[in-house]
């Protein structure tokens, strides 16, 4: 029984190492576009898009296979004449608001926008209460 548990734990530990496939990266994943203006637009857009499999990395910074596929997609669409806004909108339709670091205000994202403000207000309130107590003592 212990051998099975150890084998299962080893398989679970090896999971992240086996996450990427053995296929080569997409054609434009790590290759710049010939037009410097288009490449600059693509790079700027890639830094605003979140890698869907990484924690907090943009697709421009991530080495994940999915990020490489998304970089290739961005470069391909921009080289075909799409604007960065059109590419961004297409990715949001396909992957949802999570793909962007700047989600629009909607019912689903209200907590993301309100939480930082609420924490700042609570911190100021607690600091004020603490200073009042110190003054009295």
Image (spheres, rainbow, N blue to C red):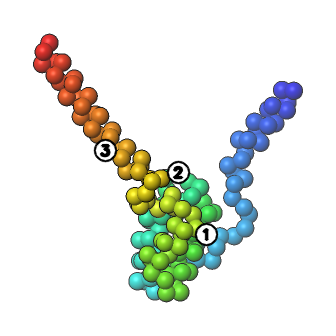
Lower sequence index among marks 1 and 3: 1
Q: Which of 137 and 114 is in front in this view?
A: 114
Residue at the spot x=47%, y=77% of the render?
Answer: 86
Q: Can residue 118 be seen in this view?
A: yes
Q: Name the residue under label 3.
A: 117
Q: Quadrant of residue 129?
A: top left
Q: Are marks 3 and 2 in contact (CB under 8 Å)?
A: no
CA gap between label 1 and label 3 equals 36 Å
Lower sequence index among marks 1 and 2: 2
Q: Is mark 1 on a helix, strand or loop?
A: helix
Q: In this view, does 29 lie above or below 99?
A: below
Q: Can residue 39 be seen in this view?
A: no
| Quadrant including the N terminus | top right
Q: In which quarter of the image is residue 14?
A: top right
Q: Is mark 3 on a helix, strand or loop?
A: helix
Q: Name the residue under label 2.
A: 55
Mark closer to the observer (3, 2): 3
Q: Mark 1 points at which residue?
A: 69
Q: Point out residue 116 in the picture as x, y percentages from the top left corner.
A: 34, 44
């Amino acid at each position: 029984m212990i051998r099975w548990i150890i084998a299962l734990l080893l398989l679970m530990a090896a999971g992240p190492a086996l996450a990427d496939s053995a296929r080569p990266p997409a054609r434009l994943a790590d290759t710049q576009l010939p037009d410097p203006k288009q490449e600059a637009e693509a790079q700027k857009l890639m830094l605003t898009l979140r890698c869907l499999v990484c924690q907090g990395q943009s697709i421009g910074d991530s080495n994940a296979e999915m990020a490489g596929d998304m970089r290739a997609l961005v470069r391909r669409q921009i080289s075909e004449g799409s604007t960065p806004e059109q590419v961004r909108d297409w990715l949001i339709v396909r992957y949802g608001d999570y793909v962007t670091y700047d989600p629009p205000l909607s019912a689903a994202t209200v907590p993301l926008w309100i939480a930082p403000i609420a924490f700042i207000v609570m911190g100021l309130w607690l600091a004020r209460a603490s200073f009042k107590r110190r003054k009295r003592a």
